[in-house]
Amino acid sequence: MANVKVPSMLRPMVGGERVISAEGGTVRDLITLVDRSHPGFAAQLMDQRSGGLRSFVNVYLNDEDVRYLGGLDTPVEQADTVSILPAVAGGRG
């Protein structure tokens, strides 16, 4: 099983878990499987119109940005770690 690291702002959706183990062949599969157990999870990460990641969400597979690999169709192995990092913006203008 791969591990999905959940950022603090999404943890309430997954019962407070920091890491969720899931099986799936791709990053998309993992997100879909987590969403089955925790409805609404995928909607926070994926753009429903394009089917891709929302522009403010970064997903890494073993510290590599999936946008530069295969996007949501990036293959995932059992020992892999998928980290979700929402972009943070703000501060003084």
Image (cartoon, grey):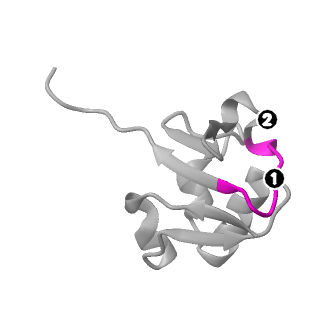
* Location of residue 65 with respect to 84 vertically, above or below: above
Between 75 and 42, the one nearer to me in the picture? 75
Q: Total number of numbered labels?
A: 2
Residue 52: give its label.
Answer: none
Between 71 and 37, the one nearer to me in the picture? 71
Tell me if residue 93 is in the magenta stretch: no
Tell me if residue 80 is in the magenta stretch: yes
The type of residue carrying mark 2 is Gly
Quarter holding residue 54: top right
User: SS for tag 1?
Assistant: loop
Residue labelled with disc 2:
70
Q: Which residues are magenta?
A: 72-81
* Residue 47 in view of the camera: no
User: SS for tag 2?
Assistant: loop
Residue labelled with disc 1:
26
At x 13%, y 25%, the residue is 92
Q: Are marks 1 and 2 in contact (CB under 8 Å)?
A: yes
- The x, y position of residue 84, in whole percent, is 54, 50
Tell me how far mark 1 sits from mark 2, CA to CA: 9 Å
- The x, y position of residue 41, in whole percent, is 57, 63
Report whether 8 appears left or right of 82. left
